[in-house]
Image: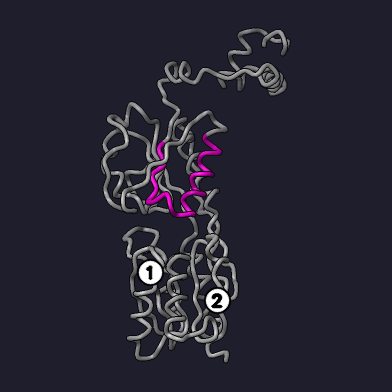
Amino acid sequence: MASRAGVSQATVSLVLGDKWRGRVSERTAEAVRSAAQELGYRPNLAARSLRLGRTRTALLVVPALTNEYFARVHAGASQVAADNGFGVVLYPSPEGVGPARGPFDSARAALDGVIASSMAARALTALRGGGLPLVMLDSDPEDTDAAATVNLDIAGGMRETARHLLALGHRRFLHLASAVDSWTFRKRARALREAVGAVPGTELSTVTAALGVDEARRSAEGALRASGRRPTAVVCDDDILAAGACKAARRLGLAVPEDLSVTGFDDLALATAVEPELTTVRLPAEQVGAQGMSALLSVLDGRPVATADLPVELVVRGSTAAPGVR
């Protein structure tokens, strides 16, 4: 390899060991990398791990494998990990948010760090106290257990949703909230309450539901039946809840959006599978995972971590319209 690149063996070791910066030029480093690729070189990760005292493995803790959003988070984290010679072990919390036993007898010996969603925070109990760096996703930035947090502009997304519905003329709102007690859902509720409450003459009621279509349908149906003055808009904490709200409307003989506007959150594939398609907040899930892995790598290397919230986008589709359009 040294011969192919026209450099010394010491230079090859520096470049392949990622210790070349400030010692050899970028051109020389690129020549070594090109030679390695041409010769089909693959590093001995086991030997490197022993030398560096690292396993080059991160644990990604999510509430469930069946949720598309977290599958996309995993994809983003895995790509950055692979680019940096790391592996990612995916660890779903049993029953979505419940506590769980650690995935390893000795997490400290098997992992370099942990990335976790705030929705799966209770599953971290078995891993706390092990001294592992922890990066939290969509989580309270004041969490003292976390070495870094990667957040979305969740409040901004909910405010945009409220402003959209208010501009259409809606004044009576139902918040179909997640029954999961996590920072991200508390943040959404607070932002919605503040945005709606800032406009005189508005009403906002709230019901909760587990994160499932049938559970959401039952909660929404009960709330719509019980309401003295029926809400004209249902704001949902995610697209799955919104799909349940749409089913509830149909069972009550209400048309979406003519009689009832419905909004979601996440922009899952489900958002365009229902009819009418959902107005929802698009979250950059892959970017969340990528930023989470990048943050963990920075923590491990002692580098500062960027703290700016990732932007979200309100996507307006057919499930919202002015109240009483027919």
User: Pointer 2: what residue?
Assistant: 319
Mark sitting earlier along the chain (1/2):
1
| Mark 1: few/some/many CA within 10 Å (<14, 14-19, 20+) | some
| Mark 2: few/some/many CA within 10 Å (<14, 14-19, 20+) | many
Left or right of residue 41, residue 138 in this image? left
Which amino acid, by three-letter code, is at mark 2?
Ser
Q: Which residues are magenta?
A: 59-81
Work out which residue is located at the far front of the displayed protein and give it: 251
> Element under label 1?
helix
The image shows residue 33, relative to residue 160, as above or below, that is: above
Front residue of this view, candidates 86 and 12: 86
Which amino acid, by three-letter code, is at mark 1?
Asp
The image shows residue 7, relative to residue 222, as above or below, that is: above
Question: Answer yes or no: do the residues labelled 1 and 2 have beta carbons within 8 Å?
Answer: no
For residue 33, the mark is none
Q: Quadrant of residue 240?
A: bottom left
Q: Please tell me whether residue 66 belongs to the stretch shown in magenta.
A: yes
Question: Measuring 43% from the left and 71% from the top, which residue is drawn there?
Answer: 244
Give residue 77's position: percent from left, percent from top: 50, 41
The image shows residue 10, relative to residue 246, as above or below, that is: above
Front residue of this view, candidates 248 and 209: 248
> Element under label 2?
loop
Give residue 203's position: percent from left, percent from top: 40, 84
Mark 1 vs mark 2: in front? 1
